Every structure is written in structure tokens, then in C-alpha cells.
Image: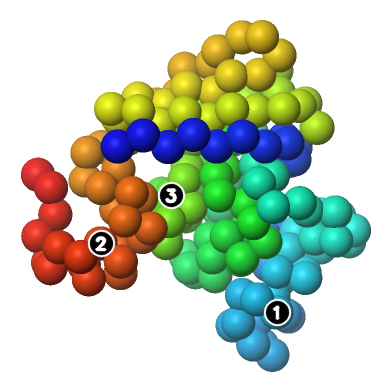
């Protein structure tokens, strides 16, 4: 499996919790990610959602996706056209929700990536590399079964295609 994503870095800080990704007040009205994408990260920056372009890549620091373990925090990014999140570390529940829904979590050193940098994220044979500003940053590899889920577009699509068996 090989995936190549190219996009603009959208820089965030440390400890971006799921209620920052999509505010709990918004989730009371609907869980439709096509509606909620208008409010993506509004707590951090009220103009963020309107500025997102398809292909943008979120870049964060430590502990991205901490807080409650809700899938909508991953799927609202996908609805906005964001296919990957790069972070130094992820909350485990967000990480698995991301994979299960087809959002690619990339664990790497993000300290040198700035807002607006052009990024190329390459997943090939389990390895992940991020290229920006003429240099390559190695990322933590993904397990084979996670790659298979991502390649299928998420866990539901994987199970539709393969039944209940995951790659060992």
C-alpha cells in the first residue's frame, strides 16, 4: 500500500482536546459532520473552518485529541477535507478513532513545521515520511493492520471488503 498526501500545514499547539476540535455545544444540535465542519476548531480560532482548503494537513504538538473519546472529532476533520493529522503524540482514543474512520495519524517531530508550509506525507510499506522545506522527517510506522484499515478507507469499509478478519 502506498499513499501520498500533499498539502498546506495548519499549525496548532499542544493538548488540543476533542472539545476544541468540535465544541460540545455544537454536538447537541447535530452529529452530522457535514454541518459540524463549519465549526471545526472554532474554540481555538473562530475563522479556522472557513479558511480550511481540501488537502490541508493539521500539525500539532503533544497529546492531540485528548479529552472525550468521540468519533466525530476525527470525522469532522475528514469532512473538512483534512486527511491527516501530524502530531508529536496523540491521545490513544483519538488515534484509534482516526484510523478506524480513515483519518491518518502521523506521529513525528513537528517542531520545525510552520503554518502554511507545504508538506508531502508518504506512507509506503508501513513507513511514513514527511517532507517539508527540503528535508524529510521520519515518522513512527503504522502497524500492518492499521495500514490495511486506512487503505480501505476506515474500519467499516475494511470489514465490508474483508469480513471480520484483520491482518495479523
First-in-chain label (1 vs 3): 1
- Spatial CA distance of label 1 from label 2 is 26 Å
| Of marks 1 and 3, the one in the foreground | 1
First-in-chain label (3 vs 2): 3
- Spatial CA distance of label 3 from label 2 is 17 Å
Is 162 drawn above or below residue 130 in the view shown?
below
Instruction: Identify residue for label 1.
Output: 35
Question: What's the residue at 38%, 58% (across, down)?
Answer: 153
Out of 72 and 158, give the one closest to the viewer: 158
- Residue 153 is labelled as none
- Residue 158 is labelled as 2
Instruction: Identify residue for label 3.
Output: 95
Q: Are marks 1 and 2 in contact (CB under 8 Å)?
A: no
Is 164 drawn above or below residue 85 in the view shown?
below
**Left or right, 124 with reference to 29:** left
Residue 143 in which image quadrant: top left
> Is disc 1 surrounded by few (<14), some (14 to 19) or many (20+) residues within 10 Å?
some
- Across and down, in percent, residue 151 comes to 33, 49
Is residue 63 at all visible to an observer of this figure? no
First-in-chain label (1 vs 2): 1
**Left or right, 18 with reference to 92:** right
Question: What's the residue at 47%, 17% (across, down)?
Answer: 138
**Left or right, 52 with reference to 130:** right
- Quadrant into which the C terminus falls: top left
- Across and down, in percent, residue 94 comes to 47, 55
Q: Secondary structure at mark 1?
A: helix
- Across and down, in percent, residue 100 comes to 36, 59
**Left or right, 109 with reference to 93:** right
> Is disc 2 surrounded by few (<14), some (14 to 19) or many (20+) residues within 10 Å?
some
- Across and down, in percent, residue 15 comes to 64, 45
Is 88 drawn above or below residue 95 in the view shown?
above
Q: Secondary structure at mark 2?
A: helix
Amino acid at each position: 500500500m502506498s499513499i501520498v498526501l500533499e498539502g498546506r500545514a495548519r499549525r496548532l499547539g499542544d493538548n488540543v482536546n476533542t472539545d476544541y476540535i468540535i465544541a460540545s455545544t455544537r454536538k447537541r444540535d447535530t452529529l452530522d459532520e457535514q454541518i459540524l465542519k463549519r465549526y471545526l476548531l472554532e474554540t481555538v480560532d473562530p475563522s479556522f473552518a472557513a479558511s480550511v482548503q481540501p488537502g490541508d494537513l493539521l500539525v500539532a504538538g503533544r497529546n492531540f485529541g485528548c479529552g472525550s473519546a468521540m468519533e466525530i472529532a476525527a470525522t469532522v476533520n475528514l469532512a473538512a477535507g483534512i486527511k491527516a493529522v501530524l502530531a508529536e503524540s496523540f491521545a490513544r482514543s483519538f488515534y484509534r478513532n482516526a484510523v478506524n474512520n480513515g483519518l491518518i495519524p502521523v506521529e513525528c517531530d513537528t517542531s520545525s513545521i510552520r503554518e502554511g508550509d507545504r508538506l508531502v506525507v508518504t506512507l509506503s510499506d508501513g513507513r511514513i515520511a514527511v517532507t517539508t522545506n527540503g528535508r524529510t522527517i521520519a515518522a513512527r510506522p503504522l502497524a500492518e493492520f492499521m495500514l490495511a484499515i486506512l487503505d480501505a478507507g476506515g474500519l467499516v469499509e475494511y470489514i465490508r471488503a474483508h469480513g471480520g478478519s484483520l491482518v495479523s
